[in-house]
Image: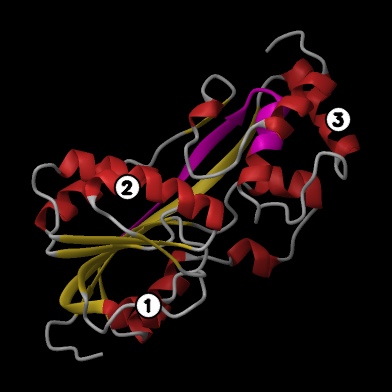
Amino acid sequence: MNGRSFEELVAEGVSVPTEGWDFSWFEGRATEARPSWGYARSLAGRLGAARAALDIQTGGGEVLEFALREAAPARPGLAVATEGLRPNAASATALLRPYGVPVVVCDQDAPLPFADGAFDLVSSRHPVRPHWSEIARVLAPGGTYFAQHVGPASAFELVEYFLGPLPDEARHGRHPERERADAEAAGLEVADLRAERLRMEFYDVAAVVHFLRKVVWMVPGFTAEAYEPRLHALHEKIRTEGPFVAHSTRHLFELRKAAGATC
């Protein structure tokens, strides 16, 4: 990537498709440390022991597909996924069809279109907003919610580079303790909750452009044209000082619905 012009890098970042949650394009252009708990492989172990499983906001299905492949041959008798974005749902359908997993298009804030107590495992990687009452409703008594969530102020060094300083409320959203309280209010018991802060590095401005186009809630309404001056300054900063460093936050939830619960 060295020596490429600002215009060339921005054009590349704009041209890369954003569907799904495959981040392989970032190889050599950006890095993010991974949480110590290894979510996808941990999910595989839980899928192997599940009777009926639901993956919420599955994106392009990449994480669920990996976990199902790792769980083989011990897979749940029933597995279903939901996704709200139509292009992602189409990608997930193609990827998960060989495993017999249907993908149901369901907006992230809509009620889940499943019966009460239908699943003994509900999972999600990076849900936008966990719908706790619905998660509790579709879980069978004794069932488990296993998920990796984005935490507070994730990648805010990058977000605030473009938007400027954000209010405290924005910095403390998605806090694991607040989510714990909301989950418990919905009738779920916390079996495990872990949180980590992880280093991110962006090696060129194309990676920044693609990241902000893909993770659309970071800088709402982001376009390369609208932020051209800030992108150009960032390009020069990376060129002269090295990678742009930010930090993501993640937390792992393992929640259980009480064996005697009825809702």
Q: Is residue 262 visible?
A: yes
Which three-letter amino acid code belongs to the residue tagged 2? Answer: Leu
Query: Viewed as shown, does residue 93 lie left or right of 229?
Result: left
Q: Residues within 10 Å of mark 3 (few under 14, many from 20)?
A: few
Residue 260 picture location, percent across and down: 12, 88
Mark 1 or mark 2, earlier in chain: 2
According to the image, label 1 marks what residue?
Answer: 113
Residue 209 covered by magenta stretch: yes
Which three-letter amino acid code belongs to the residue tagged 1? Answer: Pro
Q: Residue at x 47, y 69 (%)?
A: 106
Residue at the outermost top position: 3
Query: Viewed as shown, does residue 42 lie left or right of 149?
Result: left
Mark 1 or mark 3, earlier in chain: 1
Q: Nearer the viewer, residue 114 or 188?
A: 114
Residue 54 picture location, percent across and down: 28, 64
According to the image, label 3 marks what residue?
Answer: 233
On screen, 95 above or below 164? above
Q: Nearer the viewer, residue 12 or 258?
A: 12
Q: Quadrant of residue 182?
A: bottom left
Q: Nearer the viewer, residue 97 or 152?
A: 97
Residue at the outermost right position: 229
Which numbered circle lies on residue 96?
2
Q: Residues within 10 Å of mark 2 (few under 14, many from 20)?
A: many
Question: The magenta stretch spans which residues?
Answer: 192-210
Mark 3 or mark 2, earlier in chain: 2
